[in-house]
Amino acid sequence: MHGGQRGRASAPEIALRQLSVVRYGSIDRWSIGWNITNKGAGPLVLVAARLPHSQFKSNEHRFEPTLKLASGQSGQFEVCVICSEPAGLVTENAFVIFSVIWAGEAWRIFVRIRVTVNAEGKPETETEMITTQKTGFSGVTG
């Protein structure tokens, strides 16, 4: 697995930050707005994103059409997340996992986030680490 190392031309690089959080329908559903920046040297195509942690979870979000970011460009998107944890709870090791196309090849970008439920019950995220892996690297495709 590649470790988000600066200056590497062999793997995609991004920055991710939460922009907004709004209750979406029921008490445990949230529409989370995100800003993603392509910090790599070439264009990046976002195909899908998912958040698999049981305390901060979403279905796969397909970018239709795909979100294309030139080097240095940022884009925004929203994902509906289920989070029913009490105020003050901190969830470690939650992830946003992106499926992307970079340099003509399929990659996964793993953004490890820390989720804190604020006093109002809203989940707030902080990016802790970003790593990348070429799809099929371990013999698994898709």
Image: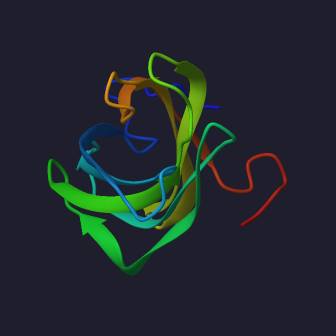
In the rendered image, the residue lying farthest to the left is 73
Quarter of the picture containing the N terminus is top right
**Nearer to the camera, 4 or 20:** 20
Q: Identify the residue at image location x=22%, y=58%.
A: 76
**Nearer to the camera, 140 or 8:** 140
- Picture quadrant of residue 50: bottom right
**Nearer to the camera, 116 or 34:** 116
Image check: 51 left or right of 139? left
Image check: 122 left or right of 37? right
- Picture quadrant of residue 14: top left
Quarter of the picture containing the C terminus is bottom right
Q: Identify the residue at image location x=54%, y=42%.
A: 83
Q: Identify the residue at image location x=52%, y=18%.
A: 89
- Picture quadrant of residue 135: bottom right
In the rendered image, the residue lying farthest to the bottom is 65
Q: Position of residue 26 (x, y in %)?
A: 48, 60
Rendered position, 11 above or below 113: below
Q: Where is residue 57 in the image (x, y as percent from the top left)?
A: 60, 48
Q: Position of residue 90 (x, y in %)?
A: 52, 18
Number of numbered discs visible in the structure rendering:
0
